[in-house]
Amino acid sequence: MSFNKIIHGFVILMFVGCNNPVPRYPVLKKSSGNLKVTVAHNKQLVKLQDAAFRQIIIENPDKHFINSQNGFWYAFIKQNKAATKYPTLGDKVAYTYQVTDLENNIIYSTKEIGLQSYAVDKEAIISGLQQGLKLMKEGEVVLFLMPSFRAYGVLGDRNKIKTNQPLIYTVYLKKIINHKK
């Protein structure tokens, strides 16, 4: 092979190899409408659960239920009017609770659950309970009507709580330990 052929091949290789790269564009797929179906299903689920909660509220006129800003209803069973402090970010709370279905069948008892400890907004617990504890003062007992999206959602707890199951929580806030002390 002559030197000229090598140079000629090298020059051709440079021209072919120096082309600008062709960008790879993402593949666009048409949505099959699953998102719209899911949204419609979830809206219907929320309506059904809210209707069930409204029926419970009607059947319990002795309790004053409050519609929270967080998508659940709650009523005080025992209030502590002398207390003024609510749990805030980083406070530790000691509490226990009971979980029932909408027919008041116990799913988890306070004895089963035992005393719980939670650092407010610094640990992971179900979102309804996380928000609900911040509405309570030490020594109070509150009944929460939790829609499934504020409890265990589409998975349930993979034990006793079913898929998309609304729940009733009875929460006892035993102690608030200020994180600044």
Image (cartoon, rainbow, N blue to C red):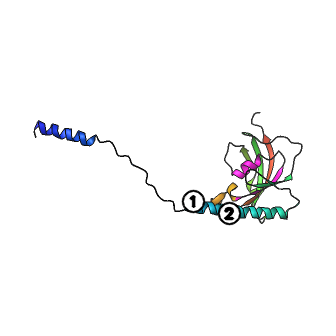
Q: From the image, tell me which residue sits under label 1.
A: 35
- In which quadrant of the rendered view does residue 86 lie? top right
Disc on res. 3:
none
Is residue 161 visible in this depiction of the protein? no
> Which quadrant holds the C terminus?
top right
Identity of the residue drawn at 24% across and 39% down: 14
Residue type, numbered disc 1: Leu
Q: Nearer the viewer, residue 54 or 40?
A: 40
Q: Is residue 140 part of the magenta span, yes or no?
A: yes
- What range of the chain is rendered magenta? 125-147
Identity of the residue drawn at 34% across and 43% down: 21
- In which quadrant of the rendered view does residue 5 lie? top left
- Callout in the foreground (1, 2): 1
Compute the Cα span from label 1 to label 2: 15 Å
Q: From the image, tell me which residue sits under label 2.
A: 45
Q: Secondary structure at mark 1?
A: helix
Q: Position of residue 108 (x, y in %)?
A: 74, 59
Q: Nearer the viewer, residue 181 or 87?
A: 87
Q: Is residue 91 part of the magenta span, yes or no?
A: no
Identity of the residue drawn at 70% across and 43% down: 121
Is residue 128 visible in this depiction of the protein? yes
Q: Position of residue 54 (x, y in %)?
A: 79, 62
- Rate crowding at label 2 as few (under 14), some (14 to 19) or many (20 or more) other CA atoms within 10 Å: some
Which residue is situated farthest in the left direction here?
2
Q: Secondary structure at mark 2?
A: helix
Is residue 143 shown left or right of residue 156?
Answer: right
- Rate crowding at label 1 as few (under 14), some (14 to 19) or many (20 or more) other CA atoms within 10 Å: few
Residue type, numbered disc 2: Leu
> Which quadrant holds the N terminus?
top left
